[in-house]
Image (cartoon, helix red, strand yellow):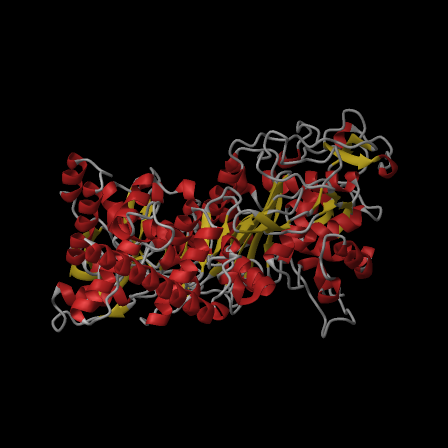
């Protein structure tokens, strides 16, 4: 008995001694390693690498830039099924151990003793956090000890939910996905809270070996791993037997989901990306920055369609340039080879690619890939007269074989006939280019922008970078200058041949009207409506180029880059579409200068606001405003103090210009726009020499939109391709959408103006009962003289477009 007691005492002493030696050893090791351990004190504030994201004003994703895909989530945003799946797969005692699971370490140690090999195991979620944030992945005893000590330190400083959230946001999941939020998007195209139980289990099985258990690359291995996780969840009581069986019976549904833009606006994305890169450097792609733009997703979609339809319409008018490629089907006859050829063709906008496999009399058979075929009927082929030049096409085809041959690789598009019925139509990538930019005139906010047919075909943004002659679109600023210098809408200018020996020009200049005709004395209103070139030139000469340039500067133009000669009257200076939008905003918003802007807000981690736009806005209570109190989102921060835009033209000048430019739509070169059925739209067409540029600059008081078409090399568009034909249809298409649910606004006459009857020929005040009379508006100080009374016999019937029965302006 005494011997047994001695043995027990000796054993206890040895155990105590062993424990002390072990504790001392551990303490010594800790003291040795402690100086080299990284600090974990800032782990709570640690910044994860998150890509740059660009959004529209209505929070639609435009683009994402960055190598790593990550969607940081708070602990309370992660569903319990996902939490349970990871705990079952990685660390079921996570909420019980102090950061180190000694049971797991003992299992790993026993494996080492039995096999003599170091194997992965014993790492808790906290230890994985320590390794992922602070340590390398090399398998050494030193790293493992560092991992243990760091895990204990982390548990002292962070709560269990905080540690688990860090882990689930940091861990690599394969396919450039980091964290469960990104993994849900990459593998299933869902938000994490939309995942099913088997999908959550599949994701939870990834961290062990993201490549080996990748459900896209290795679905069989991934299925085994998923079922293991589900089995662990059943064993731990996290799911029922029924849920387990149902989940096991579910097939693998994962597939690669790339970042999906909710709105196609690549030109916008590139501007925002460049801005972020300038401001943050390479950190822009990892710093979790979010840029909210002024773009309206609905209007951007309309702008995309408007420009593409206009460019395709131009192609239809000028002929077919031939197939993309001609193949010998006797040498390449199997669908597998055809699939490879089709996949090599770059995707361009809404165009699709097909291979002609059969040519019939009035249709062709196409192979479009993946075993699919379709027929292109005569309604999709008949337009394709051969292209010879901008002004000439070949004869109308009578047979499909006159257009295409067996083995032709072609592009085609979905089109609609007059009844709105869809059909497939032969198409081609347009050589002609186009742009559209739309802004809110009261603030300059850009709501839509398209810089070309397809960004990935040409990244050149013609809306902001293409400096082109605006043609007659610039006349608006010349006329506004004249109205500020004593002229009226009824002033007469002679529309007659003239030769100018302007010292600023290299040779004598003989300008003409587009029609080549001359119409004699013409009132300014009518001259602007019909876009009479000679009237504009004589008017500019009368007021002086210096006066006109100084006035143009009020609209935002850099006059140092505009010609200081009489060609200015015909828009010979080079400007961008966005600069024209800036100028026309003054004519739309009541006479105030606002500057176009795109970036509304820049934030970090969706919370910290780094930049908030505070543009110059129309503050005048009488000026139109697109944002009422009801329309402003409660989430938008109020801007204080408000920057008030400067008035640059008088209310009277604005009224007269707006009134005259409404006539351009109702009775002038933009009559096609009457299809919109509105009286509150105004604008001006623009066409340059030889039809090298076609414009329409149009607006109402709440929307300015500029459309442009032309070749990048400035070659002629062809006969008849004027602004009203080439560019105006795109404007109409866009504004049809933009003006929906936007009530018409009458043009309110400001104080100091008077409406009187005038003689349509002389522009002077008309006598009572005078037949050839119309209404016109004048400033009180510019009322015309009353001529001596005329006999009724001398009166003539006024033209239909200027009848005395018209309503006053």
Residue 265, image x, y percentages: 47, 53
Residue 27 appears left or right of 488:
left
Work out whether 592 lies above or below 279.
above
Residue farthest toward the front in the current orientation of the protein: 2
Towards the viewer: 558 or 149: 149
585 or 239, which is in the foreground? 239
Position in image of residue 414 (x %, y %): 31, 49
Question: Viewer-proximal residue, 286 or 522?
Answer: 286
Q: Is residue 738 left or right of residue 97?
A: right
Q: Residue at x 51, y 47 (%)?
A: 56
Rendered residue at 37%/71% (across/down) = 142
Residue lying farthest to the top in this orientation = 769
The quadrant the C terminus occupies is: top right
* Residue 680 visible in image: yes
Q: Position of residue 716 (x, y in %)?
A: 51, 65
Give the image quarter of residue 6. bottom left
Picture quadrant where residue 78 is located: top left
Snapshot quadrant of residue 653: top right
Residue at the spot 51% in from the left edge and 70% down from the top edge? 713
The tally of labels here is: 0
Residue 717 on image: x %, y %:
49, 62
Front residue of this view, candidates 21 and 186: 21
The answer to whether 554 is drawn above or below residue 559 in the figure is above
Residue 465 seen in the current view: no
Is 198 drawn above or below residue 536 in the view shown? above
């Amino acid at each position: 008995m005494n011997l047994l007691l001695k043995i027990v005492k000796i054993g206890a002493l040895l155990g105590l001694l062993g424990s002390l030696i072990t504790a001392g050893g551990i303490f010594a090791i800790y003291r040795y390693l402690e100086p080299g351990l990284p600090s974990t004190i800032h782990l709570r504030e640690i910044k994860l690498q998150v890509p740059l994201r660009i959004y529209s004003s209505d929070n639609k994703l435009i683009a994402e830039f960055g190598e790593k895909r990550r969607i940081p989530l708070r602990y309370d945003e992660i569903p319990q099924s996902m939490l349970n799946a990871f705990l079952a797969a990685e660390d079921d005692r996570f909420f019980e151990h102090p950061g180190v699971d000694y049971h797991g370490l003992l299992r790993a140690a026993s494996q080492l003793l039995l096999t003599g090999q170091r194997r992965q195991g014993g790492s808790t979620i906290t230890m994985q956090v320590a390794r992922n944030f602070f340590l390398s992945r090399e398998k050494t005893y030193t790293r493992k000890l560092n991992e243990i000590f760091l895990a204990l330190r982390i548990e002292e400083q962070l709560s269990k939910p905080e540690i688990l959230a860090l882990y689930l946001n940091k861990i690599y999941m394969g396919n450039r996905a980091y964290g469960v939020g990104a993994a849900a998007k990459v593998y299933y195209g869902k938000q994490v809270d939309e995942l099913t139980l088997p999908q959550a289990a599949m994701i939870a099985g990834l961290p062990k070996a993201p490549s080996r258990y990748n459900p896209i690359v290795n679905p069989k291995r991934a299925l085994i791993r998923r079922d293991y996780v589900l089995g662990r969840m059943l064993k731990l009581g996290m799911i029922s037997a029924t849920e387990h069986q149902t989940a096991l019976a579910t097939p693998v549904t994962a597939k690669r989901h790339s970042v999906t833009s909710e709105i196609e606006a690549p030109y916008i994305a590139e501007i925002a990306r460049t801005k972020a890169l300038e401001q943050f450097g390479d950190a822009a792609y990892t710093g979790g920055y979010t840029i909210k733009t002024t773009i309206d997703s609905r209007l951007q979609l309309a702008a995309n369609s408007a420009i593409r339809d206009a460019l395709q319409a131009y192609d239809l008018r000028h002929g077919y340039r031939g197939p993309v490629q001609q193949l010998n089907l006797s040498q390449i006859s199997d669908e597998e080879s055809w699939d490879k050829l089709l996949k090599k063709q770059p995707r361009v906008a809404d165009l699709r690619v097909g291979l002609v496999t059969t040519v019939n009399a009035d249709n062709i058979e196409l192979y479009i890939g993946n075993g699919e075929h379709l027929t292109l009927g005569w309604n999709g082929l008949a337009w394709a007269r051969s292209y010879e030049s901008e002004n000439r096409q070949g004869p109308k085809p009578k047979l499909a074989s006159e257009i295409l041959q067996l083995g032709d690789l072609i592009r085609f598009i979905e089109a609609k006939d007059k009844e709105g019925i869809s059909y497939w139509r032969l198409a081609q990538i347009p050589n002609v280019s186009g742009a559209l930019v739309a802004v809110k005139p009261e603030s300059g906010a850009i709501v839509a922008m398209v810089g070309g047919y397809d960004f990935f075909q040409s990244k050149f943004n013609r809306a902001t970078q293409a400096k082109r002659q605006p043609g007659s679109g610039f006349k608006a600023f010349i006329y506004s200058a004249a109205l500020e210098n004593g002229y009226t809408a009824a002033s007469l200018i002679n529309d007659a041949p003239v030769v100018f020996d302007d010292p600023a020009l290299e040779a004598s200049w003989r300008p003409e009207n587009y029609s080549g005709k001359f119409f004699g004395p013409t009132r300014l209103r009518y001259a602007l409506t019909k876009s009479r070139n000679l009237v504009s030139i004589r008017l500019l000469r009368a007021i002086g180029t210096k006066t006109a340039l100084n006035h143009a500067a009020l609209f935002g133009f850099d006059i140092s880059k505009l010609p200081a000669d009489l060609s200015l009257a015909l828009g010979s200076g080079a400007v961008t579409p966005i600069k024209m939008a800036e100028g026309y905003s003054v004519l739309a918003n009541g006479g105030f200068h606002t500057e176009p802007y795109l970036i509304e807000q820049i934030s970090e981690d969706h919370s910290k606001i780094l930049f908030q736009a505070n543009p110059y806005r129309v503050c005048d209570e009488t000026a139109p405003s697109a944002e009422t109190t009801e329309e402003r989102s409660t989430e938008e921060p109020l801007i204080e103090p408000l920057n008030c835009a400067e008035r640059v033209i008088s209310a009277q000048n604005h009224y007269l210009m707006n009134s005259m430019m409404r006539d351009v739509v109702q009775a002038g070169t933009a009559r096609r726009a009457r299809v919109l059925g509105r009286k509150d739209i105004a604008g001006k067409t623009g066409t340059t020499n030889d039809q090298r540029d076609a414009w329409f600059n149009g607006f109402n008081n709440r929307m300015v939109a500029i459309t442009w078409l032309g070749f990048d090399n400035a070659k002629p568009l062809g006969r008849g391709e004027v602004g009203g034909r080439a560019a105006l249809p795109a404007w109409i298409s866009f504004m049809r959408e933009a003006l929906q649910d936007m009530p018409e606004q009458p043009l309110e006459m400001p104080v100091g103006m008077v409406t009187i009857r005038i003689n349509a020929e002389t522009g002077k005040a008309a006598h009572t009962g005078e037949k050839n009379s119309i209404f016109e508006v004048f400033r009180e100080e510019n009322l015309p003289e009353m001529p001596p009374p005329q006999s009724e016999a001398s009166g003539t019937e006024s033209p239909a477009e200027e009848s005395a029965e018209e309503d006053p302006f």
